[in-house]
Structure formats: structure tokens, C-alpha cells
Image (tube, rainbow, N blue to C red):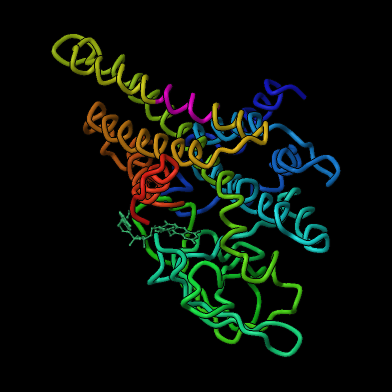
Amino acid sequence: MSDGEILDSVGAFLHRHLPPAEIRRRDAAHVPPYDLMPGMGTLGLFALAVPEEEGGLGAAWSTIAQVQLKLGQHAYMVASIFNRVVGFGLMSVLGYGSAAQRRLLVPPLMSGEAFCALALSEPQAGSDAAAIRTRAVRHGDGWRINGRKSWISDARQARWLILPARTGPAHEGHRGISLFLVPTDSPGIAMTALPKIGNHCMPSFDIGLQDVDLPADALLGEEGRGFAQLMSTLHYSRASMAATVTGAAEAALQIALSHARERVQFGRPIGQNQSVAHRLADMRMRVDVSRLMVLHLAGLISQGAPCRREAAQAKIIATETLRDVADVGMQVLASAGYSAESDMQRLWRDSRLYTFGEGANEVLRDAIARELGLGAGT
Ligand SMILES: Cc1cc2nc3c(=O)[nH]c(=O)nc-3n(C[C@H](O)[C@H](O)[C@H](O)COP(=O)(O)OP(=O)(O)OC[C@H]3O[C@@H](n4cnc5c(N)ncnc54)[C@H](O)[C@@H]3O)c2cc1C
């Protein structure tokens, strides 16, 4: 299938299963579109990222980025599920899972039957992820895990948590961390939903782990290399977020443009005022820059070229673009945007997450500065 045909089938699927009124209903009632996952699987969307020798479609990342732009423009609630399966779950398991783990996870992830949540953050370890205290110790032939995780998105619906835990002494920092594949129905796991102001179709949970016993093969990758493994696939999740929020920024721009053309005050459309028109011109430029960065990054990923700096840049540019475009969009729509029924208010509320989620932009700027040879911060 060509990229155009794939995008047409994605568009038809979204039009049919997630029309605008349904997006609003789900957001207001906090109903994530998990039920659409098998249909997305049948469409082959999750298989795009899986190599042909593993049973997938082996698409270039630039095709995946186009799909993410389209999903993000339609509704972040469905794009975030796609990103969890493809940008995080599949790329982690394909990146450092054993042959047995790949056999266990890849088929249900590809079909949309199941997905993994990343359980990294803890109450005392947000940006400073190496400060995690959740500990895994050898117990009989396997492992026993104790600790606490916070703000873990979609954890209750996930079949597995990909969970970093400390297996070495605390003073080893990121070197003493290993990854575990933890079934969410394991005895000893307790989840509490956290109330929040946006992204209502991506519920987040505080997770207590008390004497959670796992078999030896729950270790994902190598003992003590968990942090390095996470870093090795981070560009996929950053590229995924950048693409989907750029799609969301395009949606905000289109809503503002329609309103500026249609809303008449003082006898003419408000878009005829230069101060409004210039705002829309600036929005157009910002979204285009973000899209170009997303596509540039996707090209580097497709070629297997190094792209750590570009991934951080794309994530910063895209998330700050959406934040600013949604904020200006609210001003252009005024009361029409402030209505709880407006799509702009949902984009505006949701947009506040992305500049600090998936790596706070301040910390990413430090990483970019380090790539420039400057000894900045973290
Ligand atoms: C809705 C939601 C969903 C989430 N989903 C997940 C998930 O699925 N899995 C998961 O593991 N985590 C998840 N998180 C956690 C998320 O990754 C963290 O919120 C993020 O890492 C930031 O950590 P923090 O909130 O503790 O902020 P902090 O780390 O306390 O940072 C607070 C502020 O200080 C700034 N700051 C911190 N250190 C520095 C520094 N060295 N230099 C300059 N500025 C600095 C930050 O940029 C930020 O502005 C989620 C969070 C939310 C709100």
C-alpha cells in the first residue's frame, strides 16, 4: 500500500468510528477509545513498525510519522494509544526483548489486543528518573518487586507494565536499574486513578507494588542495563509525541481559521483585523516548522542515522508549538472557545501536559546543550 492509501484508510476509519461528537462525548465521560484498538490492528496500523521477518509490514518511520500526524490532528486520545503500542511498546520489545518475549508480546500488540504501559516515574523521581527506589531482588528462581510508581498512563488497561526497578545499590544511579515485564494482574499490584485537568481519555494511576513475584524471564534485556536500554529507544517515543502533537496543533489552527473567517463583529469577519490575521499567520508558520522537524526526524530514523539531538528538538518544538497555538486559538475563539463543548478548550487543556511529559523540555534543552559540547545541568 502507498502512504496515500494508508492515510486514506486511517481517515475513513476515524471518520466512521470517532466522529467529532463521539470525541467530545468520550472526553466529557472519560471513556478512552481502547475498544478501537482491534480495528486499528485489523487495519495494519500497529504492524507498520514491525519488521517483515517478525510478521509485520516493515514500513519506514516516515510512513508512521504521517499516520501519527493524521491521528493527532483527528484526536489525541486515539493517537496516544497508537504511540503507546508502536512508539513505546513494540520498539522496546523489538529493541531488547528476548526471542521468547517477542513471541509473547509482538502478536497481541500488533493485533491491537493488548499493550504495555511504561511505569518509570515515582513520587520522588520525575525528571530525575535515575532516582527511582522501586527495588527488584532475586527471590527463589525469580524476582520480587517492592515500591511505588506514579502517574502511569493507561496502566489499568495495559496487559503489561514495562517497569524499571533498582537491582543494584542506590549509589549506582542509572547503572543499577533493570527493566521488568510485569503482568498487570500480578498479585501485589494496587492501582489508584489520579484525578487530573486534561487528557481525560488517557487515565493515569498511582501503583503500589508489594511483594510482586515474577519469574526469571520477566527481566527485559540485561540486568543493570535498563536505563541504557530505555535511552536507546527514546527517540521513537519522542518522535511519536512530536508528530501527534503537531497534528493536534494543525487541528487548533484549522478551528481558529474557520472561526476567524465566520465570526462577524463590527460588520466584518474578525480575521479581517490585522491583529487577528497576523496571529493566524504566526500559527501557520509555527505548525509548518514543527511538521518539517517531525518529517526531518522521521527521515533520520528511517535511515538508521543518529538522531538523539533532533528527537529532543522535535519534541520541544512540537509541544511548545501546540501549547502556544492552542493558547492563541482560545483568544481568537474567545467565549466560543471557553465553552466546555468547544474542541479548542480540549486542545488547550491537554496541551499543558506535553511540554513536561516524556521528558521535561528544560531537561531536554540540557541534553541538546550537552550535544553542543556545553556542560549544562542534568
Ligand atoms: C498526565 C500524566 C501522564 C504521565 N504518564 C506517565 C507514564 O505513563 N509513565 C511514567 O513513567 N510517567 C508518566 N508521567 C510522569 C511524567 O513523566 C513526569 O511528570 C515528568 O517526568 C516530570 O516529572 P515531575 O512531574 O515530577 O516534575 P519535576 O521533575 O519535579 O519537575 C518540575 C519542574 O522543574 C523542572 N526541572 C526539574 N529538574 C530540572 C533541571 N535539572 N533543570 C531545569 N529544570 C528542571 C522541570 O522541567 C519542571 O518544569 C505522567 C505525568 C502526567 C502528568
**Foreground of the two, 305 or 102:** 305
On the rendered structure, is 109 left or right of 351? Answer: right
- Where does the image place residue 8, in percent across and percent down from the top left? 66, 24
| Residue drawn at 41 percent across, 68 percent down | 125
Q: Residue at x 71, y 48 (%)?
A: 38
Position of 287 relative to 148 (above/below): above
Residue 144 percent location from the top left of the image = 63, 84
Vertical side of 104 occupied by 273: above or below = above
In the image, what residue occupies the spot 57% across and 66% down? Answer: 156
In percent of width and height, residue 236 lies at 59, 44
Per the rendered image, the range of residues in magenta is 287-295
- For residue 40, which quarter of the picture? top right
Eyeballing the image, is 368 above or below 109? above
Q: Nearer the viewer, residue 363 or 315?
A: 363
- Determine the main secondary structure of the stretch shown in magenta: helix
Q: Quadrant of ligand 1?
A: bottom left
The magenta stretch spans residue 326? no
Residue occupying the point 66% across, 54% down: 92
The residue closer to the viewer here, 103 or 299, is: 299
Residue most toward the left? 266
Q: Is residue 30 visible?
A: yes
What quarter of the picture does the C terminus occupy? bottom left
The tally of labels here is 0
